[in-house]
Image (tube, grey):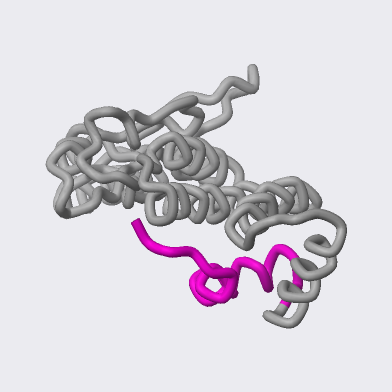
Amino acid sequence: MKEFTLKRGWNRNKHLFKVVLGWDWADLETDYKSLKMKKDISEKDYFWGLLNRMLVRSDDDTQNIHSLNKSIYLTMAWFVHWYEGKSGLPYSRLMIQAEIMDCKFGHIPNSHVMYEIAVIPDPECTYARSLKDTRYPIDVDDIPLATNDCLRPVCRCCLSVVPKRDENGRLVFKNRPSNGELVTKVPERIGFWAMVRKMLGKNNKTNP
């Protein structure tokens, strides 16, 4: 178990503090000293409380809320592992949930291709590697990562949005019929000579 200092916490997460709070090191130090004047609080307890404050603050950024929460939960997971000697998997689970939401609402291009979620596994976790070829629907509620089967104290897997493909490896497109329901439509694959014959057939019909 590592010894925690506020400076070490800042050095590991300075980018996160700048993005969420707009703080530099002087702001963090001033905030801690101001709070310490009101009540006796350790640097470690202050830092944990600050992470929770950042979760609330991230709600103000509706566009990046899930991405920010994902980073904060990951920091929490490493914090309890490094500085408290506990498993970080409960916070890794929250991180995965935030990443699922980020995949749903943050990374889907506006196109006619259907998408799904893939796992980018930790290469050293055999359980995670067993999920690398599994695809999950984009509206999935849960993905079995950071579970008791995980071989890491903190889950290091990621999720990615990928185009959906059929059993032949072809892209699956979406089509909206008149009733408004979403259906799957796979474009027809036509060989070169079949395409030529099809074109010649059309020309023969138009030119008697």
Relative image position of residue 105 (x, y in whole percent): 60, 43
Q: Is residue 107 toward the left or the right of residue 96 in the image?
A: right
Relative image position of residue 70 (x, y in whole percent): 54, 49
Q: Nearer the viewer, residue 100 or 20?
A: 20
Residue occupying the point 58% across, 20% down: 181
- Image quarter (top left, top right, bottom left or bottom right) of the C terminus: top left
Q: Is 114 rendered above or below residue 47? A: above
Q: Is 190 rendered above or below residue 4? A: above
Q: Residue 17's image quarter?
A: bottom right
Q: Nearer the viewer, residue 204 or 176?
A: 176
Count the marks: 0
Q: Is residue 66 toward the left or the right of residue 127 in the image?
A: right
Residue occupying the point 80% across, 51% down: 60
- Evaluate whether residue 148 shows in this view: yes
Report the magenta stretch's main SS: helix
- Image quarter (top left, top right, bottom left or bottom right) of the N terminus: bottom left
Relative image position of residue 91 (x, y in whole percent): 47, 40
Q: Is residue 101 toward the left or the right of residue 144 in the image?
A: right
- Evaluate whether residue 207 shows in this view: no
Q: Residue furthest top?
A: 179
Q: Nearer the viewer, residue 146 or 165?
A: 146
Relative image position of residue 143 (x, y in whole percent): 38, 30
Q: Is residue 174 toward the left or the right of residue 106 in the image?
A: left
The answer to if 77 sits in the magenta stretch is no
Q: Is 152 rendered above or below residue 138? A: below
The answer to if 18 sits in the magenta stretch is yes
Residue occupying the point 23% across, 52% down: 122
Residue occupying the point 17% across, 54% down: 123
The residue range painted magenta reads: 1-23
